[in-house]
Amino acid sequence: MVKVSICIPTYNRADYLQYAIASVEQQTYDDWELIVCDDGSTDNTAEVMASKRSDARIRYVSHPQNIGRSRNMRSGFDAAVGDYFIKFDDDDALTPTFLAKTVAVLDTHPEVDFVCSDHWIINAKGERDEAATKENSAKWGKDKLEAAIIPDLIRETFIKQSLQVGSTLFRRSCLQQVDYMRPQADGCEDFDLLVRLALAGYQGYFLPELLMEYRFHGGQTSLQQDIHFLSAKAFCIDTYRFQDPKLEQLRQKKLGQVQQILGLRLIEKGETIKGREVLKQSTQILGNSYRTTLSLILSYLPLNWRKWALDAFRRSRPQDYSARVREVKK
């Protein structure tokens, strides 16, 4: 029986996929299987996978048509047989010692259900950006976590969102218990999984080492992707319930904030009526605000004026490290 199952869900990223697979092949720990689950790619992904047939540890689950991110991820999870499990995206990578170090934690700490690490930020060329890596660690509070069991997992997953599924090795049994990926959370499934594990009382361990590479590139963001993500996140937050009254109050506030951003993005796309409805839902939680008022005013402008105004606003804001890294071309 293999010890670790690794899943890489992919869709039309054959070039990046080769980099991701190579990072698995270069692991110093070798008791693993790799499952690449393909969500109906139309590029040369099949040819890339055909070149890997000589390695019996690598399996290819190919779907003839697109079934959606979460269902594709679930297909890789369902095919896994290892005691431990990790899923990371096709444009990311593991550092060579990731498995050796995370497996060691789970082997020596039976009370721990999953182990997370910090990660590098890399650009489209696969170059590590040290400055962006430090900023990212500080932004999400990873630089404050020590090598230990995470003391307040709900705070780290729901409030700070410090942890990342792609840099986390799980006991597969705990993922089976929480039903792994919910299709309704498609686009926000990583956040959802970690919060549901925290709510279910599982324990996480943090390794403050850069053991994974997370890639920023220009193909990751679009208006439609933002709307898809925000809709999924609103669904997820709406389904959680916290026993602590302060946490429950915060959950409601977060739901209103996500609805507020989603409403604006829908108005920007031209889905005006739906956008106004979502904004009204947010006001039921947050009350009237300057941002909501401006968004509603914007909804009465012609579509091209809305886009111009929002583009001008975004250009006026200081550029953060993620935007700078995404500007690097392959």
Image: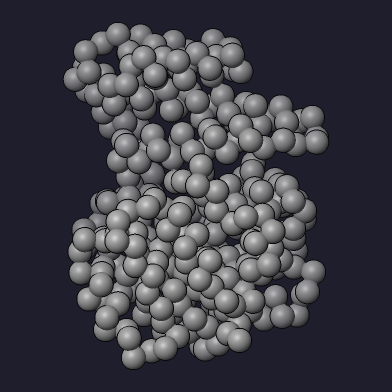
Residue situated furthest bottom in the rendering: 54
Res. 330 image quadrant: bottom left
The N terminus - image quarter: bottom right
Task: Return the x and y of residue 322 as percentages of the image width and height.
Answer: 38, 49
Q: Residue at x 55, y 57 (%)?
A: 164
Residue 246: x %, y % from top left: 76, 30
Quarter of the image where one finds residue 90: bottom left
Is residue 293 toward the left or the right of residue 204 in the image? left
Which residue sits at x=34%, y=59%? 39
Residue 122 visible (yes or no) = no
Q: Is residue 222 visible?
A: yes
Say whether residue 237 is left or right of residue 60: right
Instruction: Single out the residue that lies furthest toward the front.
Output: 64
326 versus 117 height, above or below: above
Give the camera-side residue of 74 and 87: 74
* Residue placed most toward the observer, 40 or 275: 40
- Residue shown at 74% from the left, 58% from the top: 202
Looking at the rendered structure, the number of numbered marks drawn on it comes to 0
**Quadrant of res 117:** bottom right
In the image, residue 120 sits, relative to residue 95, either above or below, namely above
- Of residues 14 and 70, the one drawn nearer to the viewer in this rendering: 70
Left or right for 195, reference 137:
right
Measuring from the top left, give residue 172's x and y in whole percent.
Answer: 63, 68
Q: Nearer the viewer, residue 93 or 185?
A: 185
Across and down, in percent, residue 251 comes to 66, 32
Establish if 312 lies above or below 22. Answer: above
Q: Residue at x 42, y 22 (%)?
A: 263
> What kind of colouring is applied to the model shown?
one colour
**Is 179 positioned to the left or the right of 93 in the image?**
right
The correct choice, above or below, for 289 with respect to 110 in the image is above
